[in-house]
C-alpha cells in the first residue's frame, strides 16, 4: 500500500537524517524522496541509518531548489515548528494528511521539511499551500527532522487506513474522481495549478505591480509574501491562473511575461 505523497528535504546538513527519513517513509508506505541541495549525499552514514530502506535512497532525486522539487505539484504542505511574523494557513498533522490525500488523485502532492537548524524560510513557505505544525510539548518542542518525517508519514498512513475502513477503495488514476477526493475537488473544470504555474503568475503579478509603482522593487519582501499568501488560500486551478495572467497582460498593454 504505497501512499503517493512526495517527501522533500531541504538543505539537509546531516546525511544520517536523510537515511532515517527514508526509513521512516518506508515503514509507513511512502517511497518518493526528493533532496534539495543536501550537504552530503550519497553517504555511507545515510545508508546505514536507512536500515534496509536503501531502495528509497537509491530512487531519491537531488535538485537545486525547492521550486524544482515541487514544480509539478498542485498541493504542497510545509512543516514548521516556529511561529511566523506573517500568518499562514496552519494545520495539524492529521488535517494536513487529509488535505494531501484529498488532492493526491488529481495532482502530485508534497510534504516539505526544512534544514535542521533553521527550518523552512518564509520564502520557502511562500511556495506552500499550507503550513503543518506538530503540537509538541511547548516546554521542549524540538524535533529532529527525521522524527518530524515519521510523525507526518504516520498520520498519512492512519488517514488512508481510516478511509479504507470506511469503505473507500485505493486511490484511482489522477485526474479522475476518486475515493480520496475532497468534496468539490472532483467537480473542478481544471486541475489545481502547479507550483511552477503559480510561480510564473507571481512573477507576472510582481512585474505588473512594479510597473504600476504599487510594489517597490527595493523593498518588496513582505508585500510579495502577503500577496502570495492571498492567492495560496484561494486554491487556484489552471484555468483561473490563465485568466489572471491574461488580465495582467491586458493591463500591461499586451506585454507578456515568461
Image: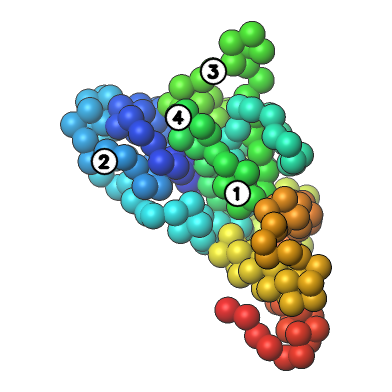
- Lower sequence index among marks 4 and 3: 4
Separation of residues labelled 2 and 3 (CA atoms):
24 Å
Secondary structure beneath label 2: loop
- Residue lying at 34% horizontally and 42% vertically, measured from the top left: 38
Q: Are dots 2 and 3 in contact, CB under 8 Å?
A: no
- Residue 142 is labelled as 3
Marks 2/4: CA–CA distance: 15 Å
Residue 149: x and y in percent read 48, 30
Q: Which residue is mark 4?
A: 116
Q: Secondary structure at mark 1?
A: helix
Marks 1 and 4, the one that precedes in the sequence: 4
Q: CA distance from mark 1 to mark 3?
A: 22 Å
Compute the Cα span from label 4 to label 3: 10 Å
> Which residue is identified by label 1?
123
> Which residue reaches farthest top?
139
* Crowding at mark 4 (Cα within 10 Å: few <14, some 14-19, many 20+): some
Q: Position of residue 223 (x, y in %)?
A: 75, 55
Q: CA distance from mark 1 to mark 4?
A: 17 Å
Residue 148, horizontal then vertical, whole percent: 51, 26
Q: In this rendering, does residue 127 appear at all?
A: yes
Question: Given contact means CB atoms under 8 Å apart, are the residues at marks 4 and 3 in contact?
Answer: no
Which residue of the protein is positioned furthest toward the bottom in this rendering? 254
Q: What residue lies at 36% left-to-right and 33% top-to-bottom? A: 13
Question: Residue 142's quadrant in the figure?
Answer: top right
36 horizontally vs 218: left or right: left
Residue positioned 70% across, 58% down in the render: 220
Amino acid at each position: 500500500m504505497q501512499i503517493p505523497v512526495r517527501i522533500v528535504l531541504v538543505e539537509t546538513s546531516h546525511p544520517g537524517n536523510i537515511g532515517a527519513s527514508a526509513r521512516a517513509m518506508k515503514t509507513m508506505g511512502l517511497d518518493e524522496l526528493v533532496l534539495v541541495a543536501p550537504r552530503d549525499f550519497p553517504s555511507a552514514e545515510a545508508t546505514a541509518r536507512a536500515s534496509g530502506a536503501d531502495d528509497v535512497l537509491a530512487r531519491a532525486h537531488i535538485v537545486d531548489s525547492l521550486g524544482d522539487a515541487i514544480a509539478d505539484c498542485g498541493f504542497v504542505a510545509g512543516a514548521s515548528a516556529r511561529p511566523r511574523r506573517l500568518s499562514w494557513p496552519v494545520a495539524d498533522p492529521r488535517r494536513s494528511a487529509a488535505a494531501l490525500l484529498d488532492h493526491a488523485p488529481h495532482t502530485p502532492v508534497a510534504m516539505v521539511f526544512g534544514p535542521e537548524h533553521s527550518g523552512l524560510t518564509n520564502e520557502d513557505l511562500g511556495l506552500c499551500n499550507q503550513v503543518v505544525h506538530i503540537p509538541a510539548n511547548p516546554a521542549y518542542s524540538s524535533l529532529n527532522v527525521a522524527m518530524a518525517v515519521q510523525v507526518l508519514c504516520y498520520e498519512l498512513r492512519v488517514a488512508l487506513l481510516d478511509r479504507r475502513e470506511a469503505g473507500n477503495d485505493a486511490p484511482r488514476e489522477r485526474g479522475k474522481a476518486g475515493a480520496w477526493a475532497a468534496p468539490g475537488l472532483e467537480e473542478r473544470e481544471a486541475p489545481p495549478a502547479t507550483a511552477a504555474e503559480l510561480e510564473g503568475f507571481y512573477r507576472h503579478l510582481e512585474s505588473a505591480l512594479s510597473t504600476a509603482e504599487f510594489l517597490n522593487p527595493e523593498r518588496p519582501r513582505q508585500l510579495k509574501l502577503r500577496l502570495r499568501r492571498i492567492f495560496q488560500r484561494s486554491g487556484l486551478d489552471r484555468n483561473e491562473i490563465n485568466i489572471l495572467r491574461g488580465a495582467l497582460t491586458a493591463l500591461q498593454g499586451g506585454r507578456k511575461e515568461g
